[in-house]
Amino acid sequence: MIPSIPQPKSFRVAYGAYVALFFIYLVLPLGVVAVFAFNDSMFPSLPWGGFTLDWFFNDTQPRLGLFHDPRLLSSIWTSFFIACWVTGLSVAVGLTNAFLFERQDFPLKNVLYMVMLLPLVIPGVILGVSILVFSSTIAAFLETNFGLDVFFLRPSKFLVILGQFSFIATITTLVIAARLRKFDIALEEAAQTLGASKLVAVWTVTIPYLKPALIGAAIVSFLMSFENFNTTLMLVGSDQPLTIAMYGRLREGSTPELNALSLLLMVGAGALALISVFVQRDKP
Amino acid sequence: MRMQSATRLALFLLLAPIVLWLALLVILPHVDMFMVSMRERVGIRQYEYSFANYVEFFVEPLYWRTFARTAIMSIIATVMTLLIGFPVSYYIAKMLRGRMKNFLFLLCLVPFWVSELVRTFGWMILLRESGVISNLMQWMGLVSGPVEMLYNDATIMVGFIYTSMLFMVVPLVSTLDSLDDSLVEAGYDLGGNAFTVLRTIIIPHAMPGIVSGCIVVFMLTLGNYLTPVLLGGKDSLWFTEQIYTQFITRFNWEQGAAFGFLLLGLSSLIVWAGLRLSRQTLSQTMG
């Protein structure tokens, strides 16, 4: 079953057809979402009512376009705010973790590494509820003992950021550590021999080497945060991030405005994917 | 002496963030959730330690049936994802070369980059009563009226397989890629047919990829919330939904925490069993 071994033609045709069918299955749902963003009808379904850009640009109800819908725009902003924080925190902690695991030796290092992987095997819903329970325990403790009302320990943007960070940091750690492992430490030592302090050597030699991994990790964290649903659902407060707002509309049944939004998300994610492929490509 | 204290300081500075992160956001919350799951409300703001919440799970058929259903459907989804994904991964890894290979591999990654909500929305547009496929079937004369294809188990399964496929294909392609063609040729030279070569050479070689793919797919399916709720409707009976109901709708945190632990236990058990069966470690599979 490799090209060098002859197979009956019928088998090759059937196999090719199966793979083609698979890719149709993969692309079809995304394709229909995109196409119906331009449907000139109140519903994202057939019959096709003709081509329109209303679902992006129209400014009056009931055919409110995406760019004139204050509720959706503000939820995009909320998601963006959360994603920026999560990205910054996860990349920073991922970087320090990479140095910790690749450069340092200490007792129980393997145990710590195992614990660090745990957030990947805990379902997102459970990560969310456990943080919800713990933060409300702390809030209740502070309130009964000190009379403090700590508002950010109630479901809020702050908790959503912490919840997403709790598992995205594992991913950034793995990405950055993999790159740091390939780094030749002699380069850093050479910088120190030439008179740089340890910190200056790391800053001017090692960090630039890690740049592709840092950018890649940042893109992945941003996207995972922006698109996260399970953990966010449990921790969300009054400002709804985009995924929660979209979920609400999906359940109500929505106009093709939601398709326009989805198309925008796909284009944004596609652009980020291209950047990350481009950045991570190893130059010969 | 100074040098030594400097490296100690560096170690502590590097340990601080990870310890804070894991202690405050992963370990302590789970310990606390366990404590909550072990208490029973006996009066207003009065609690006693007991197993009542876990007993409730076994006493109420709805709960354990939902739990069993979730586990079984997740296993079926994992097996189906493997069966559908394996030939495709093999095709990408072994039958194709160059540009086409890279292109199709990247195409498999597309669902990862697109939000799960958007993907599920796509399936809703395709499968609902007024959807594209229902209309297409009417137009072709296969059925006489609109067909509702949402809100049943088969549809939930299609959604799961779609969402999970990438996590199966990526590890499979990378292990199959490392299989030397000459081994397959040798298998044929020694008189094997396609089936024996597949069984004795290709599958054993791909085993690490199969295991890590299956573990990730199983966990993601078990913990999925959107797909069963949106594609399965009100009667989808998924366990994460039950957790959400207890926490957010009924505000019964004690019960919800117990459910959370049961789900966590199930997922850990399956991951552990998968790793034991294949003699791998978590670090090898994830890292």
Image (cartoon, grey):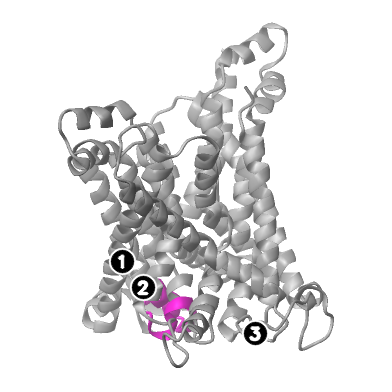
The residues bearing labels 3 and 2 have C-alpha atoms spaced at a distance of: 32 Å
The residues bearing labels 3 and 1 have C-alpha atoms spaced at a distance of: 41 Å
**Residue that sits furthest to the top in the current view:** A193
Badge 3 crowding class, 10 Å Cα cut-off, few under 14, some 14 to 19, many 20 or more, is some
Q: Pointer 3 and pointer 2: residues touching (CB < 8 Å)? A: no
Mark 1 sits on what residue? B262
Does residue B263 lie above or below A18 as drawn? below
The residues bearing labels 2 and 1 have C-alpha atoms spaced at a distance of: 10 Å
Q: Which of A170 and B43 is in front in this view?
A: A170
Mark 2 sits on what residue? B239
Chain containing mark 2 = B
Badge 1 crowding class, 10 Å Cα cut-off, few under 14, some 14 to 19, many 20 or more, is some
Mark 3 sits on what residue? A43
Residues in magenta, as a range:
B230-255
Q: Which residue is drawn at 34% across and 36% down?
A: A2
Which amino acid lies under the numbered mark 3 shown in the image of this protein? Phe
**Marking on residue B108:** none
